[in-house]
Amino acid sequence: MIEINNVSFSYEQEVLKDININIARGKFYTILGPNGSGKTTLLRILSKSLHINKGEIFIDEKELSQIKTKALAKEMAVVPQCTEVEFDFSVQDIILMGRTPHIPRFCAESEKDMEMSKNAMKMTNTWELRNKSVNTLSGGEKQRVVVARAIAQETGIILLDEPISHLDIHQQIEIMNQLRKLNKSKNITIIAVLHDLNIAAAYADHMILMNDRRVYKDGIPEEVLTEDIIREVYELEVYITKNPKTGKTFIMPY
Amino acid sequence: MFKSKKIISLVLLVFVCFVLSSCRNKDTNKDINTTKKETNVVVYPLKIVDSNKRTVIIEKEPKRIISIAPNITEGIYALGKGSSLVGRSNYDDYPNEALRVPTVGDLLEPSIEKIVELKPDLVIASALFNKDIIKKLEGLNIKVIVLGDKENFNGVYDTISKLGQVVNASERSQSVITRMKKKVADVAQKVASARKPTVYYVAGFGKGGDFTAGKDTFIGNMIEMAGGKNAAADIIGWKYSLEKLVEKNPDVLICSKLYDSKEGIETAVGYKDLLAVKSGKLFEIDENIIVRQGPRLADGLEAIAKLVHPELFK
Amino acid sequence: MTYIEKKSYYKRVFAIGIFLLVIVIIVATNFGVANISLKQTALIIMSKIPLANKFFPLGGIKYTSVIILLNLRLPRILLACLVGAALSVVGTSYQGIFKNPMADPFILGVSSGAALGATISMVFLKEVQYFGISMVAFSAFLGAMITTFIVYNIARVGTKIPVVTLLLAGVASNYLLSSIISLMMTFNRDNIEEIVMWTMGSFSTASWSDVILLFIITVPSIIFISTFSRDLNIMLLGEDSARSLGIDVNGLKKYIFVISTLMVASVVSVSGIIGFVGLIVPHVIRMIFGPDNRVVIPFSALGGAIFLIICDTLSRAILPPSEIPVGIITSIFGVPFFVYLLYKTKKKAI
C-alpha cells in the first residue's frame, strides 16, 4: 500500500538514487545499511519532511504530495532519532501531543484522548513517569516516551528511526515486543530503521538493505542476510546460523 | 644781517618745536587705553577685555570681520558696518544682506579651513565657542574676540557697546542702545497698571518633554517685563510637567513660529484641552528676536507685550 | 497534572489576575504630579461609565483635574496595558517558533525599521496629524512593516521559512538600519534629541486615538495567537516532529509572523522601542505556570500589562516633574533578570 517508484533525492549531492520499494499493509519492515547509505533520508521522504526531486510515492494509491499534513498525521506516526525538548513539559503532556491530529482546533483533549495516552504509556512502561519533566529523564526513558507518543497517535503506519539505540537489552526487547504486538493485533505497519542485524532479523517480516544511496536487496531476512551480501555491503566476514529457540536468522561475525 | 638770520631761525625753531609738541600730545592721547563708554571716537590700537576675560589688542579698524554668532552679525549690520563682514555662521540669517555673506559652519565648531581661507582681520565669536578652536585660530595668527555677556538687557547693551568700539562705530552703538532703552521704558510704562494675565512660553513639547521658561531664565524675565505673570515661575530652569501646566491653565500661550509649533500644540495631548488654546490665545512669535542677545531684543520685548496686552498696543 | 486537569484552577487564577490589573490601573491613575485625591479619581472614572455616572456626580471637582485624569493619565495607562500585553504575547510566540528562549519581539528588524521610518519623518516631513495619528507614527509603522517584509523574503526559500536564516537576516538588518539612523543624525544635529527620545520609548504623549487604534489591532491579534497555543506547544518538539503530528508548520510560521509583526509595528509606532518586556514576562510566567502555551499566552498578556503599567508609573514617580523614558526602566529591571536567565541556561547546558 506504500509504493515508492523511481524516487531520487539530493541536497547538493545525491542522497537517494532510483529507489523502488513496495510496502504491504500490516507487515513489519526493517531498513538496514551502513552509515551514510540513506536510511534516515528514506524515512524523511516518506514522512514528507523532505521533498523528492524525481519519482512518485503513493500511499493507498494517493500521491503523497497531494495528501494534506493533518490527514497524513492520522495515517503515519514518526519516532525520530533526536528527542531533545528545550522546555519543561511533563511526560504526559508530550504523549498527549500525539493525539493532536485527532483533536479539532477549538476543542480540548477528550476522555478518549486521555485513555489512548494512558494505554500507550502502559504499553511502553512510562505510566509511572507521567508527571516527571521530560528533561529529567534518561536517554532510554526519553526514547520510550517518544515511542509512546507515536502509539498514542493511533495511526496505521509507524516509522521509527533507530528507536532502541539507547536502551539496555531488556528494554530493547520490550519495545520490540510491543511493536510486534501492535503489528500483529492491530495490523499496524511498522517500518523501523535498525542497526542491530540480529534484532532486525528476529522481528522483521521483510528487510530493506540500503547501500550507497540505493536499495541493495529487498526481501525476507533469509534472502537478505547472506554471507556474500554482508561481505559486500558491510565488508565483514560472518557466520550465519539460526537461533535454535526462535528459528530466526542469526549472524556471528568472526 | 647775521642778527636777522638768527631771529628767523629762532622763530622757525620755536615754530617747529610748537608743531612737534602738539604732535607729541596726539601720540600721548593714542597711548591712553580707550575703553571708556563716554568717548565716541575709537582710537586704535584698541585694548579690550572680552567675555572670556582675555585681553585682546586690535591694531586698527577691522575691515574683514568673521562673525560666528547671530546676535553679533545683527549687531554689525545695525552699526552700519555690514560691508566689513566677510564670513558668518550658518545660523546668522538676519538681516537679508547677511545671507549673501559666505558661511563658515555652525556656532560651536565652524570650519577652521574656511575661516583661514577668508583671511579675516578679526573673528568675533559667542561664549559658546569651543576654546580649543580659539587656540588653534590664534596659533594661525588670526585674532579672536569673544563677546557675549549675562543674558539680560544690561548684558546686551554691554555687548553692543563693546562691539561698537571694536568695529569703530561707537557713536552708532550708543544710539542703538539708547533706542533700545527707550523702547523698553515705553513698554514698561504702558503695561505698568494693567492686570497681569498668566503667560506660558512653550519652549518644547511632545515626546521630547515639556519645556518652558522658568523663573530665572531671561525669557521668564521678559514675560514679567511685558506685563505678564510667568505661569512657570514655580520652577527654575526649563523642565516642566504637562500635568502642572494643565492645572495652571494659563491665560496666554506663546510658542515659536518655527517647526509648525502652533499646529503641533493645537493637537497635542493635554495642550489641546487648555483654555488658552481653545479660545485662540495661543500666539506665535519669531523666537529669534527674543532669544538672540542682539539689537532686536527690545523689539522682542515689545512683541511679547503686544501678545500679552494687545489692547494697549493698538 | 495535565492542562485539562488544572483548567479550573487556571481560570480562577486568571480571574484574580484581571482583578489585580484593575487595581493597578486605578492606583496608577491616582498617581501623578498634580494633586488629585483617590476619591476624586474614583469619581472621575465613574463619571465616564455609562450607567453608573448617574450615581456619582462630579460637582466640586476642578475642570483641570478631570482633564488631567481622563486625557493625560488614563490614556497612557491603558496604552501601557495594551503594549505590555502585545509585546509579551509576541515574545512568547517567537520563543516558541524560534525554539529559542532568548527571542524577543524585535529580532526581525521591526525596531530598527520603525526607528528609521520615524527618523526620516522627523527630519524631512512636516509634523502633522491625520485622524489623530501623527506622521511620525505612520512612518514608523511603514518602516517596520517594510523592513520585516524584506527580512522575511531574504530568508524565505520557496514556501519554507528557515528559522535560523530569518534570525540572522533580522540581526543584520538591525545593524544596517541603526547605522543609517546614526548617519542621519550626524547630518541633522538639530534632530538628534528628538530621535533619541523617540527611540527610548515613552507613553508621555499617549492619546485616546492611540489607545483605540492599538486596542483594535492588539486584542483580536492576541486572541488569534492564543487559538494557536497548542500548535506552538508542538512546535517545541521540532519542526519535523510537529509536521508529523499534523501541524502546518509553514502556514503557522507565516500567520504568527504576520500578526506579530503587525502588533509590534503598531506598538513601536505609537510608543517607541520598549525592550525586555517581550523577553522577561514569558519566562517569569513559565517559571510559575510551566511551559504550556495555552496557559503562558493569556497569563503573559496579563503579566505584561501589569508590569508595563508599573514601569510607566515608576517612570513618572522617580524624578518628578521629569519623566524617565519607560524603555530605560524596563531595561533596568530587565538586565539583571536577563543575566540570571543566562546563568541558569548556562548551568543547564553543562
Image (cartoon, rainbow, N blue to C red):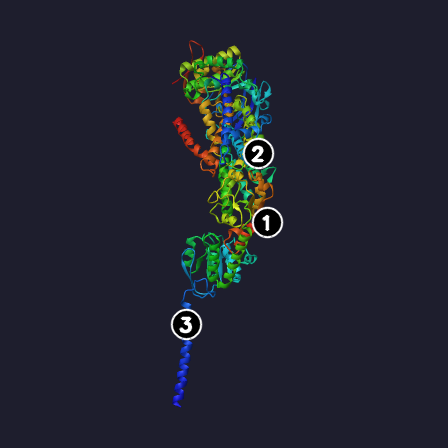
Q: Which residue is mark 3?
A: B25
Q: Amino acid at mark 1?
A: Pro
Residue under label 2, please give it. C208
Q: Position of residue C94 (x, y in %)?
A: 50, 29
Which numbered mark, 1 or 2, is in the foreground of this view? 1
| Amino acid tagged 3 | Asn
Instruction: Please tell me if label 3 and label 1 are on a single chain.
Output: yes
Image position of B93 with respect to A131: above or below? below
Q: Quadrant of the N terminus of chain A?
A: top right
The residue beneath circle 1 is: B310
Residue C118 in the image: state x and y as whole percent: 54, 40
Q: Are marks 1 and 2 in contact (CB under 8 Å)?
A: no
Dot 1: chain letter:
B
Looking at this view, is B54 or B171 the one in front?
Answer: B171
Which secondary structure, mark 1? helix
Q: Residues within 10 Å of mark 3 (few under 14, many from 20)?
A: few
Q: A220 or B235: nearer the eye?
A: B235
